[in-house]
Image: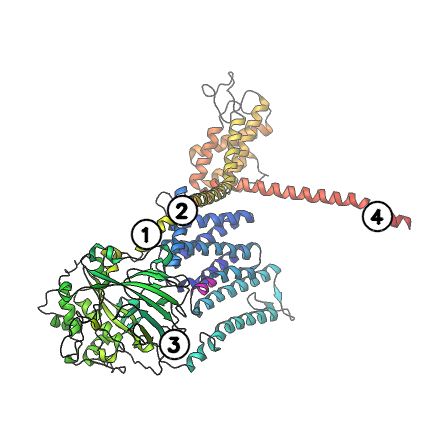
Amino acid sequence: MTGRRRLGLVAAAATLLASAPLATIFDSWTWLLQVLLTVVMIAGAAVLTRTLRFPSWAQALGMVAALVVTLTWIFPSGHELLVPTPATLAHFGELIQQAGNDTRSYAVPVPDRDGLLFIAVLGIGVVAIVVDLLTAVFRRPALSGLPMLAIYSIPVAIYLDSVPVTPFVVGACGYLWLLVADNVDRVRRFGRRFTGDGRDVDVWEPSPLAAAGRRLGVAGVLVAVLLPLVVPTVTGGLLSQLTQSGSGVGSGLGKGGNGKINLFASLSGQLAQNTTVNLLKVTTTEKDPFYLRFGVADQLTAEGFGNQPPAGNTLDAGSLPDPRRESSTAGSTFQQYHAEIEVTDALRQSLAPLYANPVGIRDLTGNWAYDPNQQVLYSNRTTTSKQKYSVDYLRPQYTPAELRTAPELDRDDPIRRAFTVVPDNDYVDRQVARITQGVATDYDKVRAIYDSFSRKYGFSYSQQTQSTGNFSEIEAFLKNKVGYCQQYAAAMAWMVRAAGIPARVAFGFTRGTMEDGSTYVITNRNAHAWTEVYLKGFGWVPFDATPSAGVAGAARSDWAPDVDRTAEPSAAPTTAPLPGSSASAAAGQNQRPDRANDGGAAATTVGAGTDQDNWTGLLIFGVIATLIALLLVPALRRVLLRRQRHTATAGVAEPSEPGPAGAVTGLMVTGETARAREDAHAAWDELIDTMVDYQITVDPTETPRLTAQRLIRETVLSAEPAAAVELLGTAEERARYAREPMRGVELTSALRQVRGGLSHSATVRARVRAVLFPPSILLGWRLALSEAGTRTMEAAGRLRENLARFNPRRLLTRTR
């Protein structure tokens, strides 16, 4: 394998390594398979075009064509057959527009959305082409680091925190590999190396200068990776983390500072709170507000609940959902309230606190989006630090009697299938079966599980949990009966799911400490987790199973009262009813998390840009059609040349030497001697070009007869093609050496038989090359370019000589 082809393969491998940062953006590995296929196709096109000795521009066009075809295979519109069509290009435009909407709607890691995957594959494909051209064509591999760095800049621009180190290390290794491969190739091209005593030096053995350069490169990468981890920074390095306390922000909501809360409801752990930090201040028109919420965890494992990225429309893309307009909550009465929220610099996260069922959000700075299914307000780039915003929200009014009317969900209901998945645990199943035995309605089952976490049954609040021993996390908690909020929330959600009722864990803040009649101050000690249960017709209804004595600012409702009190409280103003999540009550909204992306607002935006999209699609189609046409130029030139040879010598058989009846088109020897010789020569030229197309050796020193015999012997032609070859050889031999050439013989059909016989005996690769990229045409073009270059150099030499005659120096020399 030549050096350029070898460097092209190394460039492809380096591009794949440089794409490692995409692993931090996507939630799964689908992008890797698609990128791998695309880069392999581009590398294959590069190797093929270089094997055929195409010029540089043709190599670039070949790689672009491979990229377009691969994108068509991976993201088809359903109206094409392997190759792109106008419908395919229009589909590509839709994917690009979808990707633009998704970038504003999804937080990292993003799901496998076709638009985002298309942009990723297209970007990596373009980078692969640029890296290949810089490395193998222009021999500037150092510049290929710029497009590789562009890939790494994507997570840098998206992540609020520092980007993981591993992708940078992987990409840097690919870049160093590319530089080393180019250095080795340059040494090979220069020649063999020897030491002073004449010993042959292996090509991989570095010279002192090259070894020093490689050591400096490796040292630079290590410094770039390790230095940010060690040196204390504003966001915290390794030393900063070692000098900070390990206390988390909130009651059991994860360890780690920087004003962020980990959305994972663990079933085991220790909680330490040494300091109190003010996080936000809330002023609301509601007399007895419930909890502010900012996150949801609905992915259950044996260790607890984790969260999945939210998905929704930006705040300026459309109005928020209004549960008063939902048919599933038509029987509920809603009361609207207004709240002003002021966040301090201590709370720096991408999830904004708000009350459930918001119908209006104003004054938030930055790009924020709302997920109606999770009821989460989130951003990919902006944090809540020093934000001041207002929220209009609704509180539904319903009683335990109304919740008992909620019917059981069907087993095939998508909400039940999604939110009742639990790990296998016999102990939990037995406990749930015992607690809910004889209970009829879903609400009564949830209430029975909720009541079981009371002091009456031995449960208590503590920040120091006991050892799990040999039990599982959930089993240990239910047996030890000691824990804090996230353990209570996760355990209750698990047990409710085991009873066949959808449940999840919500994260947020209790209402905090009242500063005056309507303002509450919320600190890190008010961070909290509780359970949300889905009841058909009411949506997500909250239940806080954590003992209220251990929760600052706890609130209870009449359907989920404080079970540790001796008497169940009545529905007084101090225990105002708590909302169900009516915005997510409709099953259609929960079936597809990305439903908001297909809403009317997005459709309006699309309609406004229809003309621009049409022009963009036509432009893309024109560019791709031009590229395809340029790639088909050699094949078209070969077809035209063959037709010219067939039609230029068309004639009619002489009556004295009759041929086929009537007029016969094609290569036919006429009665005129000169015309007969021309026809025979044209047929022979066509045969020679056909041999070149199928890479059969042509020896100009052989006679036509010997060439025909060798062609039959090497290609093992059948009887009819072999006879046609002999006929063509005899016609050319008679035209060259005999007094009279052959007359009245049909040569066009003979050429067709020979071409069919050679195609039948050749490989698929040879047939494709002979049709699409005929070597006879490419060879002729190369020879023409070489001759043109030679003539240009000769003309330049003559011009230089002529100018030298009028050189003033000659006059000065003669004067002397």
For the residues carrying marks 3 and 2, which lies nearer the camera in this image? 2
Residue 783 visible here: yes
| Residue displayed at 20% across by 68% down | 577
Q: Mark 4 = which residue? A: 808
Residue 123, position as x, y percentages in the image: 45, 55
Residue 106, position as x, y percentages in the image: 36, 60
Horizontal side of 337 relative to 811 (left or right) equals left
In the image, 228 versus 34, the foreground residue is 228
Q: Mark 3 = which residue? A: 257
Label 4, label 1: how far apart the Cα atoms are: 81 Å
For the residues carrying marks 4 and 2, which lies nearer the camera in this image? 2
Q: Mark 1 = which residue? A: 599
- Magenta span of residues: 152-163
Q: Would you say residue 645 sits in the magenta stretch?
A: no
Mark before the other along the chain sequence, 3 or 2: 3
Q: Mark 2 = which residue? A: 608
The answer to whether residue 767 is above or below residue 588 is above
Label 3, label 4: how far apart the Cα atoms are: 83 Å
Label 1, label 3: how far apart the Cα atoms are: 38 Å
Label 4, label 2: how far apart the Cα atoms are: 71 Å
